[in-house]
Image (tube, rainbow, N blue to C red):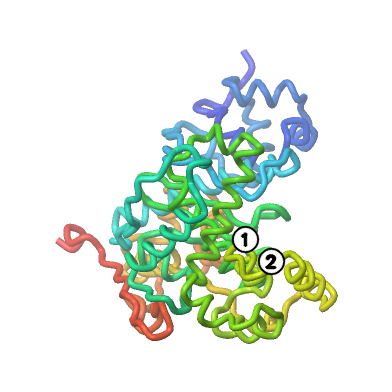
Amino acid sequence: MKPSTPGFVGAALREARKARGLTGALLAEKIDVTKQAISSYETGKSPSPDVAERICEVLHFPLSYFLNRPRTKLQRETPYFYRSMSATTRLARDEAEIKMEWLVHLSSIVETFIELPQVNFPVIDLPSDPTKISDELIEDIASQLRTFWGLGNGPISNSAWLLENNGAIVVRRRLNAETLDAFSIWVRGRPFIVLSSDKNCAARSRFDIAHELGHLILHRNVPELYIKTPEYFKLIEQQAHRFAGAIQFPISSFAKEVSSANLEVFRILKHRWNLSIAMMIKRAEDLDFLNERKRQALWRSYASSGWREQEPLDDKLIVEKPRVIREAIELLLSEEILSRSDILSEMNLYHGDVEDSCGLPSNFLNPKAGDILHLRRHLRQQEFSEVHDRPGKVIEFRPEEKLRN
């Protein structure tokens, strides 16, 4: 009888392969087996110890990732919301979804010991049919959300921290695909947002956050069938765009501050609102501030100014960095509740994959870096200002009392 690797889980091999962006044929070539052999390993046949070792080396996973352990499928409440569903991004989406599962797993480990911010999103009864969500309804919901979060009508000082304050898990990491600027889902009553770090532009990133917030609010009840139907998918994306403009630049403020819809006015407003000039032109279109002639003239001037590649202030505005996951892990380490090795053992991953999937700095969880940190126990209140003249809430991470007994 041929030797095998007891406890080898085929589904784990499929996940690991997708996490590396490889097809079965490419993996087969790299480990010197047939494509059929890879297929058989992924569907239940156990590889020999030698082949299993080559799989670990090529894919750079510990053997424990593939061995007997619970394989709990991510219980998503919503479809994944992407900017593109084209075939060319299928491998990138597969990789993103596997790493989202790792992020959710890490957050569940963190929540075993740390009290994360409670989810504070309004419950809004919206149609499951996106064709019944009108522009007027979108504007109204954005206004309701601003009221619910106490934002007033001014600029949001930090969109990432605002969402984290209200219970969202937000991370920024490389997505390795031009069309994957960001994506989001609801899992177990908590929203998760992944932002791309590939394009280092603050205004664009703020729009991405607001766009994903639009999906999380507007499309929570929309069945996946609509997402996979091109005409509905296009409408859903347009609705998220409209919401992003409405939540970031309320109609009342826009009407008051945009005395004339021209590039110079938008350039000045960009510094105050931290929004792209392109976004503000589109907002003017949505609110019927422009006739067709003026609209075309604005976009021609925008293009001729070279702003499609880089707008004014793009090199000066600072990209917002999420911090809840990092701060929570720092607390676990500084309180010696878990070590880096403990976390990696729970994840069955090397530190690089955990860092990548959760938007952590390189070597942040490297056991060789040591496990003792001396860091503050909670975020400073003044850092969480949600709007320019409004103090933010404090996110305080507290170990469960029972752990102190």
Left or right: 227 in relation to 120:
right
Picture coordinates of residue 211 (x, y %)?
55, 58
* Residue neighbourhood size for the residue with mark 1, other residues' Cα within 10 Å, grouped as few (<14), some (14–19), many (≥20): many
Rendered view: 350 above or below 257: above
Q: Which quadrant would residue 298 be assigned to in this image?
A: bottom right
The structure residue drawn at horizontal position 14% and vertical position 61%, both measured from the top left corner, is 405
Residue 52 visible: yes
Q: Is residue 48 above or below residue 405?
A: above
Query: Would residue 403 appear left or right of 34 to someone viewing this image?
Result: left
Residue identifier under label 2: 199
Give the amino acid at mark 2: Lys
At horizontal 64% and vertical 59% (from top left) the residue drawn is: 174
Measuring from the top left, give residue 121's x and y in whole percent: 35, 57
Vertical order, 247 against 104 (above or below):
below
Q: Residue at x 69, y 37 (%)?
A: 54
Residue 188 in the image: state x and y as whole percent: 36, 44
Quadrant location of residue 42? top right
The N terminus: image quadrant? top right
Q: CA distance from mark 1 to mark 2?
A: 7 Å
Q: Identify which amino acid the numbered label 1 is placed on.
A: Ser
Q: Is the residue 344 above or below the residue 336 in the image?
A: above
Identity of the residue furthest to the left in this view: 405
Q: Position of residue 167 (x, y in %)?
A: 36, 60
Total residue callouts = 2
Front residue of 156 and 91: 156
Front-most of residues 405 and 376: 376
Task: Tell me where residue 168 sits by quadrant.
Answer: bottom left
For disc 2, the neighbor class at 10 Å (few under 14, some 14 to 19, many from 20) is few
Q: Residue at x 52, y 48 (%)?
A: 100
Q: Which residue is mark 1?
A: 196
